[in-house]
Image (spheres, rainbow, N blue to C red):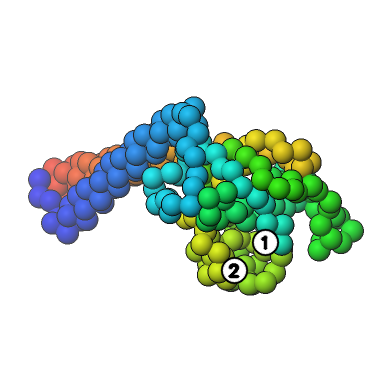
């Protein structure tokens, strides 16, 4: 039985590429599982104190942290399109002046939107004077889909997203590289029912099986085509 070189090479190429992609997705899933284990470990560990000393994001992300200082109520941003229990609302993100100097952004919690007027912010309380808060260090205050950058324009109280470095440059505040997702209650009336951080490991396993399924289908098709071609070669000519 003779094989046609080009079809055989194409099938082998598809099998090799899809098998490798499946292994790549498996490795990504393993990395995310390790990250989930770290997140669980960090959340149950003692809180790390936040001071004015700059901290690299990778050294603190997902850790429990504590900070003592004062909220700066005129340095606040309301992140739009953050629903809670299917109700539209905002995340209240406010600068926090640390007791020993330096600043950090705090995602204080969720606030329902005024349905009659989008730009009217519902009342909430901001603690006066020095307070101590606890929370989880996150890379940002959550991100929502955004077309262009109009929702993040400077000097707007209501925005779609907030980049820490860009906001530091905008305000001139020496902000830490992370945002504290506040978990402690300060009697402000904000909702802090935070969604659990997800890494999407199930999606990676799903892609892994899809790629390996394609590889198996390509190999099966190649064997079927080869068998059919062999039968034609053995068939007596009319």
Residue that mark 1 sits on: 75
**Is 209 on the left-hand or right-hand side of 167?**
left
Asked whether the beta carbons under mark 1 and mark 2 sit within 8 Å of each other, the answer is yes
Q: Residue at x 49, y 40 (%)?
A: 49
Q: Tell me if I can see residue 168 in this picture.
A: yes
Q: Secondary structure at mark 2?
A: helix
Q: Camera-side residue: 133 or 57?
A: 133
Tell me residue 238's x, y (percent). 18, 50
Q: Residue at x 26, y 43 (%)?
A: 19
Tell me residue 98's x, y (percent). 57, 50
**Residue occupying the far right of the picture:** 116
Using the rendered view, name the quadrant where residue 29 is placed.
Answer: top left
Residue that mark 2 sits on: 171
Q: Residue at x 67, y 61 (%)?
A: 75
**Is 206 on the left-hand or right-hand side of 100?**
left
Tell me residue 182's x, y (percent). 62, 42
Q: Is 3 located above or below residue 76 in the figure? A: above
């Amino acid at each position: 039985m003779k094989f046609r070189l080009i079809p055989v090479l194409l099938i082998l190429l598809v099998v090799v590429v899809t098998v490798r992609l499946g292994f790549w997705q498996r490795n990504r899933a393993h990395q995310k599982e390790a990250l989930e284990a770290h997140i669980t470990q960090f959340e149950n560990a003692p809180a790390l104190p936040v001071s004015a000393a700059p901290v690299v994001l990778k050294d603190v992300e997902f850790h429990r942290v504590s900070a003592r200082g004062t909220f700066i109520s005129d340095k606040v941003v309301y992140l739009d399109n953050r629903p809670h229990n299917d109700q539209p609302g905002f995340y209240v993100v406010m600068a926090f002046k640390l007791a020993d100097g330096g600043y950090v952004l705090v995602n204080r919690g969720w606030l329902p939107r005024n349905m009659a007027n989008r730009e009217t912010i519902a009342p909430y309380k901001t603690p006066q004077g020095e307070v101590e808060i606890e929370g989880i260090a996150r890379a940002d205050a959550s991100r929502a889909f955004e077309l262009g950058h109009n929702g993040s324009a400077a000097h707007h109280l209501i925005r779609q997203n907030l980049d820490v470095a860009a906001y530091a440059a905008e305000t001139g505040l020496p902000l830490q590289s992370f945002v504290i997702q506040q978990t402690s209650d300060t009697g402000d009336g904000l909702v802090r029912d935070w969604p659990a951080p997800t890494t999407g490991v199930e999606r990676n396993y799903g892609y892994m099986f899809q790629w390996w399924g394609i590889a198996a289908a390509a190999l099966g098709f190649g064997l079927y085509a080869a068998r059919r071609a062999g039968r034609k070669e053995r068939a007596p000519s009319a």
